[in-house]
Image: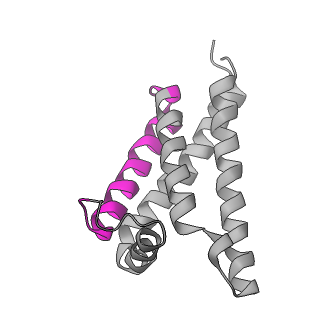
Amino acid sequence: MVNPGKALGRALIGALFIYGGRNALVNRQHLTGLIDNAQETYGVKEKVPATSEQLIQANGAGMVALGSTLALGIKPNLSAIGLLGMIGVTTAAAHDFWNLEDPQERNEQMTKFFGNVAAAGGLITLLSTKG
C-alpha cells in the first residue's frame, strides 16, 4: 500500500532537485567561476579531469534525472542516495560560508547551506520510513 504522505514528500523533494538541476543547466556560465574558486580552495583543480562547465552540466543533469525518479517513485531509495551524494558535494562547493569575510554574503550562503541541509534531512527521512 502506498503511503500518500510519503508519496507527496517524494514529489516535493524531487521538485526541488528538478528545479535546482534545471537552473544549473540554464545558468551554468554564471556558476563556472564559483566552481573554479571551489576547486582552487580545496586544491583539486588539477586533479579533476573535467571543466567546471562540464561538472555543472553533469550535476544539473543528475539532479533533474534523480529528482524526477524520486518524484515519480521510481527506485526512490536509490534516487535519494544519489541525491544525498550530489547535495553534499554541491553544498560544500557552492555554499562555503566559512570562507567568506563579508557578513552579508556569509549570511546569504549560510542560509543556502542550511536549506541544503534541510533537503538532505528530508531525503534521509524518506530513506528511513516505510511505505
Return the x and y of residue 123 as percentages of the image width and height. Answer: 63, 38
Find residue 26 and report its image quarter: bottom left
Residue 14 point in image, percent of width and height: 54, 44
In the rendered view, would you say 96 is above or below 7?
below
Residue shown at 28% from the left, 66% from the top: 46
Along the line of sight, which residue is nearer the eye, 97 or 62? Answer: 97
For the point 57% across and 59% down, which residue is it?
Answer: 91
Residue that lies at the very extreme toward the front in this rendered image: 43
Residue occupying image coordinates x 45% and y 28%: 74
- Secondary structure mostly seen in the magenta stretch: helix
From the viewer's side, name the closer residue of 65 and 32. Answer: 32
Residue 76 highlighted magenta (yes or no): yes
Q: Which residue is drawn at 46% across and 38% down?
A: 82
105 vs 127: above or below: below
Indicate the quadrant containing the N terminus: top left, top right, bottom left or bottom right.
top right
Give the mark count: 0
Taking the image as shown, residue 51 lies to the left or right of residue 94, namely left
User: From the viewer's perspective, is 116 left or right of 25?
Assistant: right
The stretch in magenta equals 49-77
Relative vertical location of residue 85 with respect to residue 39 in this rendering, above or below: above
The colour scheme used here is one colour
Depth check, front residue: 107 or 70: 107
Residue 20, image x, y percentages: 50, 60
- The quarter of the picture where residue 101 lies is bottom right
